[in-house]
Amino acid sequence: MPSELLQFLKVYSQFVHPVLMWVLLALTIYALYSGLQWRRARTATGDLKKNLLKEKFNVKHYQIGSVVLAIMVVGSIGAMGATYINSGKLFVAPHLLIGLGMTGMIAVSASLSPFMQKGQDWARYSHIAINVAITGLFGYQAITGITIVQNIIKRMGT
């Protein structure tokens, strides 16, 4: 019985990463939205500013950004672990390399927070540029990830 359970976990662990990454993509889009709303709140005036500030987009953006950072790092490590356990190797291909690059980029983006809190515009613009690039790369990762999942399913059928 334990070997059957291990085999089940080995096979289906390959699907945790794709599901987690689709959730992460949705969270990333929400982080983008809340960040844009916080930027609007900082530059707005009058009643618009009051209404936007009530929504506390700065807190929402910071919190969801922290969750996105954690999921991306853990998801990247987990995916490499599941791939290695199931294949005995990592496949050095664009999907892996871009995923690792995105993981590094999000760490750099998060590290800019203290500078942004001190009002440093260079940090704010860098943070925005990095995160827009990450979101764009996510589109590529989603497409190549679907292809990888299809290949795993084909392999399971044979």
Image: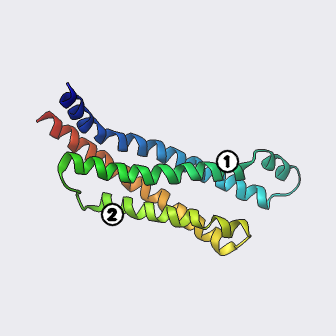
Q: Residue at x 49, y 56 (%)?
A: 135
Q: Amino acid at mark 1?
A: Lys
Query: Residue 154 occupies which quadrant of the picture?
Result: top left
Q: How far apart are the alpha carbons under marks 1 and 2?
A: 30 Å
Mark 1 = which residue? 60
Q: Amino acid at mark 2?
A: Leu
Q: Residue furthest bottom?
A: 122
Labelled disc at residue 125: none
Q: Residue at x 47, y 49 (%)?
A: 71
Q: Residue at x 27, y 43 (%)?
A: 149
Whether residue 139 is situated above or below residue 119 in the rendered picture:
above
Determine crowd level at label 2: few under 14, some 14-19, many 20+ residues with C-alpha closer than 10 A.
few
Whether residue 10 is situated above or below residue 107 in the rendered picture:
above
Q: Residue 95, position in %: x, y?
A: 31, 57
User: In the displayed structure, does residue 149 sit left or right of residue 64?
Assistant: left
Disc 1 is placed on an element classified as: helix
Q: Residue 148, position in %: x, y?
A: 26, 47
Q: Residue 5, position in %: x, y?
A: 24, 29
Mark 2 = which residue? 97
Disc 2 is placed on an element classified as: helix
Q: Assign the C terminus to one quadrant of the image.
A: top left
